[in-house]
Image (cartoon, grey):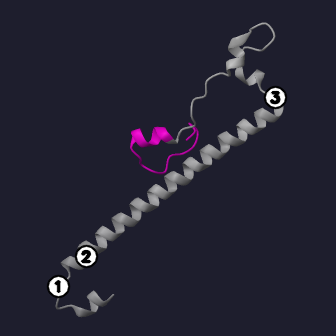
Amino acid sequence: PIGHDKKYYNMAPKFSKFLNPPEVDEPIIVLASSSAIPSEAEEALKPKEKRAELALRRAHVSDAWVIRAATAASFFIRSSLRCLHHLRDTIPASNIRAHQD
């Protein structure tokens, strides 16, 4: 999600880009008048709004990591099941004990 975070999971770039924090346009108020309102979007926000925006960004990043972890776990489980099915199919039918497990 963020550049300095380590990437532990391989994901398709097309899917990975959806987990990045969304790009936000400057508020429309900034475009209305440049004399009384600061030109930077961050300067136009009140301290409470800045804290709320920071909390939303953190929540988005943590949600992205949860999605990545869940995707990796799902991939691992599906791979493990395929491997187990392959092993089961290669064990001869005469080996009853192996098929019981």
Name the amino acid type tagged 1: Pro
Magenta-colored segment: predominant secondary structure: loop
User: Which quadrant would residue 1 be assigned to in this image?
Assistant: top right
**Separation of disc 1 and disc 2 at Cα?**
10 Å
Q: Report the amino acid beneath label 2.
A: Leu
Does the magenta portion include 8? yes
In the image: residue 95, left or right of residue 9 = left
The quadrant in which the C terminus is found is bottom left
Q: Secondary structure at mark 3?
A: loop
Percent position (x, y) of residue 49?
77, 33
Q: State which mark lies toward you, 3 or 2.
A: 3
Horizontal side, residue 38 vs residue 60: left or right: right
> At 17% from the left edge and 85% from the top edge, which residue is drawn?
92
- Name the residue tied to disc 2: 87
N-terminal of the pair, mark 3 or mark 2, is: 3
Percent coordinates x, y for residue 48 in the rendering: 82, 35
Specify whether 81 is left or right of 42: left
- Circle number at residue 46: 3
| The quadrant where residue 72 appears | bottom left
Give the secondary structure at mark 1: loop
N-term mark: 1 or 2: 2
Q: How many neighbours does mark 2 have within 10 angstroms: few (below 14), some (14-19), or many (20 or more)? A: few
| Classed neighbour count for the residue bearing mark 3: other residues with Cα under 10 Å, few (<14), some (14–19), many (≥20) | few
Q: Magenta segment range?
A: 1-18
The image quarter containing residue 98 is bottom left
Query: Eyeballing the image, is 99 above or below 79?
Result: below
Location of mark 1 (residue): 92
Q: Is residue 71 magenta?
A: no
Q: Earlier in the sequence, mark 3 or mark 1?
A: 3
